[in-house]
């Protein structure tokens, strides 16, 4: 741990030279510090927030991923940092090239590599249990969480994805129809509108988790979406339902008809209604309305919108250990 303190001290000095101070942590616990990680792909210095407890035994690592339009300073994941400090887990919050409005971000090879580098950096600078490396994110973070599950399945003991974008081309159309600015972000990231050229079509596919999820069959995955998302929020729950279908056994998959019903009206279709045991980790107001498990994937549609529930994330991840 002495080596880790030395690294943290040196990176804080580097950030001071950049004119970046601790005030940019925006509500993160004092134990969480800014660090700089050298990219193994292009040699650039990539910022992150990091915490590791002082302990003689290896600890779990949570890789928390920022939302679509933000970066490593985003305070949305403060509850995940707080939870790690309380539980004595390590925590890292990488930048992975910042907001998803440019080719280097939005699921690019550079962004993927930055997250792999962040895990490797944490393992070098703290005592990390390799069997308990977790990842969680909501919205754009959920998008990246599922993308990484398929791109680098060997790393993760468990992945918790909330209200994720899983099909970039479909979301572009949905954002256009709803008048949301994210369609412009996708065009900037992918080089234009879907269908404009084969190259651009390939960019949308490459940045979509649905393209890669089959490779995540052995990763425990927990996918969550609020029933009102797409109505009061920006990502229709069809993105989560279709991701589950890729991972589920054939007999457990949700029909396209029920996906359409689920998405168009914020209620569980009559043919899919079920009795669900109370889940205290979701709180009294955000209880699951529909849930399914197949192979190593679980999906929960809960009484909420475009949001995550930190306690539910920790509750589920805590039960996962990689063989």
Image (cartoon, rainbow, N blue to C red):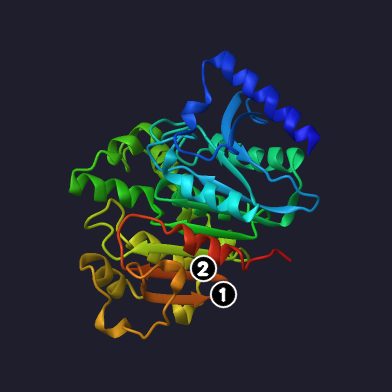
Whole-angstrom CA distance, mark 2 to mark 1, is 7 Å
Dot 2 crowding, Cα within 10 Å, few <14, some 14–19, many 20+: many
Q: Residue 70 location, x and y as percent? A: 41, 36
Is residue 181 shown to the viewer in this render? yes
What residue is at 52 percent from the left and 35 percent from the top?
Answer: 95
210 left or right, relative to 193: right
Dot 1 crowding, Cα within 10 Å, few <14, some 14–19, many 20+: some
Q: Nearer the viewer, residue 314 or 262?
A: 314
Q: Nearer the viewer, residue 102 or 135?
A: 135
Q: Residue 19 location, x and y as percent? A: 52, 15
Q: Is residue 258 above or below residue 227?
A: below
What residue is at 51 percent from the left and 50 percent from the top?
Answer: 80
63 left or right, relative to 228: right
Q: Nearer the viewer, residue 139 or 2?
A: 2
Q: Nearer the viewer, residue 49 or 212?
A: 49
Q: Which residue is mark 1?
A: 295
Image quarter of residue 133 = bottom right
Residue at the top extreme, as displayed: 17
Q: Residue 91 location, x and y as percent? A: 61, 45
42 left or right, relative to 323: left
Question: The C terminus lies in which quarter of the figure?
Answer: bottom right
Q: Residue 157 location, x and y as percent? A: 65, 60
Q: Are marks 2 and 1 in contact (CB under 8 Å)?
A: yes
Q: Is residue 266 above or below residue 198?
A: below
Is residue 43 shown to the viewer in this render? no
What residue is at 41 percent from the left and 70 percent from the top?
Answer: 300
The image's mark for residue 247 is 2
The image's mark for residue 130 is none
Question: The N terminus lies in which quarter of the figure?
Answer: top right
Q: Earlier in the sequence, mark 2 or mark 1?
A: 2
Marker count (numbered)? 2
């Amino acid at each position: 741990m002495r080596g880790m303190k030395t690294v943290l001290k040196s990176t804080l000095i580097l950030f001071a030279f950049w004119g970046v101070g601790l005030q940019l942590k925006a509500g993160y616990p004092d134990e969480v510090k800014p660090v700089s990680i050298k990219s193994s792909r292009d040699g650039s210095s990539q910022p992150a927030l990091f915490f590791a407890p002082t302990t003689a035994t290896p600890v779990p690592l949570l890789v928390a991923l920022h939302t679509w339009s933000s970066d490593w300073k985003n305070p949305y994941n403060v509850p995940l940092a707080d939870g790690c400090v309380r539980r004595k887990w390590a925590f890292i919050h990488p930048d992975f090239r910042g907001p998803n409005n440019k080719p280097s971000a939005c699921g690019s090879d550079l962004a993927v590599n930055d997250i792999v580098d962040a895990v490797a950096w944490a393992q070098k600078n703290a005592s990390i249990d390799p069997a308990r490396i977790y990842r969680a994110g909501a919205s754009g973070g959920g998008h990246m969480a599922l993308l990484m599950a398929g791109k680098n399945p060997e790393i993760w003991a468990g992945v918790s994805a909330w209200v994720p974008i899983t099909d970039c081309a479909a979301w572009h159309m949905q954002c256009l129809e709803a008048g949301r600015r994210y369609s412009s972000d996708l065009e900037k990231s992918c080089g234009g509108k879907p269908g404009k050229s084969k190259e651009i079509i390939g960019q949308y596919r490459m940045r979509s988790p649905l393209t890669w999820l089959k490779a995540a069959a052995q990763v425990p995955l927990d996918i969550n979406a609020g029933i009102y998302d797409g109505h009061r929020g920006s990502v229709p729950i069809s993105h989560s339902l279709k991701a589950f279908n890729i991972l589920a056994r054939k007999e457990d998959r949700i029909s396209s008809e029920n996906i359409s019903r689920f998405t168009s009206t914020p209620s569980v279709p009559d043919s899919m209604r079920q009795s669900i045991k109370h889940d205290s980790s979701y709180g009294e107001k955000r209880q699951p309305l529909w849930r399914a498990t197949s192979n190593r994937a679980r999906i929960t549609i809960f009484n909420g919108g475009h949001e995550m529930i930190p306690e539910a994330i920790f509750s589920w991840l805590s039960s996962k250990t990689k063989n």
